[in-house]
Amino acid sequence: MKVVLALVVSSIVLVPGIVVLARTEPPQPGRVSVSYLPPKHPAHEPIYEQLKEIRFLEKVQEFLSRVRLPRTLLVRLEGCDGDDNASYDNDKDTIVVCYEYIDEVWKTVPEATTEDGVTQVDALVAPLFETTFHEFAHAMFDMLRVPVLGREEDAADQVSAYIMLHFGKAEARRLITGAAYAYKTEAEAAKAPPGVKQFANAHGTPAQRFYNLLCIAYGADPQLFGDMVKQAHLPKERADDCKDEYEQVAYAFQQLISQYLDPALAKVVSEKGWLPDAKWQVSRKSASAQKK
């Protein structure tokens, strides 16, 4: 009897399928938790305080909770010992957005609203939402076993853009233009090294991501984003095919991910405002300023 029991226990431990099933439950909405870890560096305190003030993570939690997940996903802000990054850890089911990354975004916030209508708060908050949704796409690919054809980083960018475009029209406009502003600023500041190594990264270059984002947005709503073409931010030769690009993303999302959205919760989420008031002032006391 002891031998039989030992064999049964061994089979449960050793068979991968059983281990996976033990870790996975039927997908349910509301399986997103969030956490603001206190900054390791005192210079990041202003970032910590202002994101708590606008309830950034609480809004992320409420928005993402409409997706039925098989396990709990943790989204947290924390200091990363100098690494200006954001990532998804599939071993820990955790998205980490580093204060160092947020500070890099903070440095690009304009002194006043830009000619294209990008406000201070949009220049800060839109890239953070876009990055969080990008990492959430990685989490969905992993947790929901969503097949990805092509580079996963490109697919995550497309899912992030698709999500932002399904906010209300006014907020979708603010999110897309704010995120595009960050990519354009990064592209203009970049000093490309000799050769082609800048193209070896799994992510597209900032310039490529800028145009891809605008193309999907224009393809989704040519009226809302028509000025992107009129003002030559998006070349007409690219814009002509953007409807097809958007429809390809939309079809893939509908086929592979929409089944995991909670319909009742999704309706409530889509009718709510998520972004801080456009007149909200971003403190210029960023980490870089604190170090001086």
Image (spheres, rainbow, N blue to C red):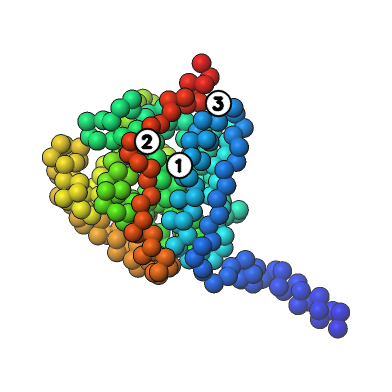
Closer to the camera: disc 3 or disc 1?
A: 1
Q: In the image as oriented, which residue stretches furthest toward the right?
A: 2
Near mark 1 (Cα within 10 A), the count class, few <14, some 14-19 or many ≥20, is some
| Residue 182 appears anywhere in the view | no
Label placed on residue 280:
2
Judging by the rendered image, the residue that carries numbered circle 3 is 43
Residue 282 coordinates in the image, percent (x, y): 40, 31
- Taking depth in this image into account, of 235 and 223 the one nearest to the observer is 223
Amino acid type, callout 2: Trp
Q: Quadrant of residue 249?
A: bottom left
The CA span between labels 1 and 2 is 9 Å
Query: Label 1 is placed on what type of residue?
Result: Ile
| Gap in angstroms between the C-alphas marked 2 and 3 | 22 Å
Q: Residue at x 28, y 41 (%)?
A: 177
- Where is mark 1, residue-wise? 54
Residue contact at pointers 1 and 2, CB within 8 angstroms: yes
- Characterize the local packing of mark 2: few (<14), some (14-19) or many (20 or more) Cα atoms within 10 angstroms: few
Give the amino acid type for the residue marked by disc 3 in the picture: Ala
Residue sitting at the far top: 292
Say if 92 sits above or below 195 in the image. below
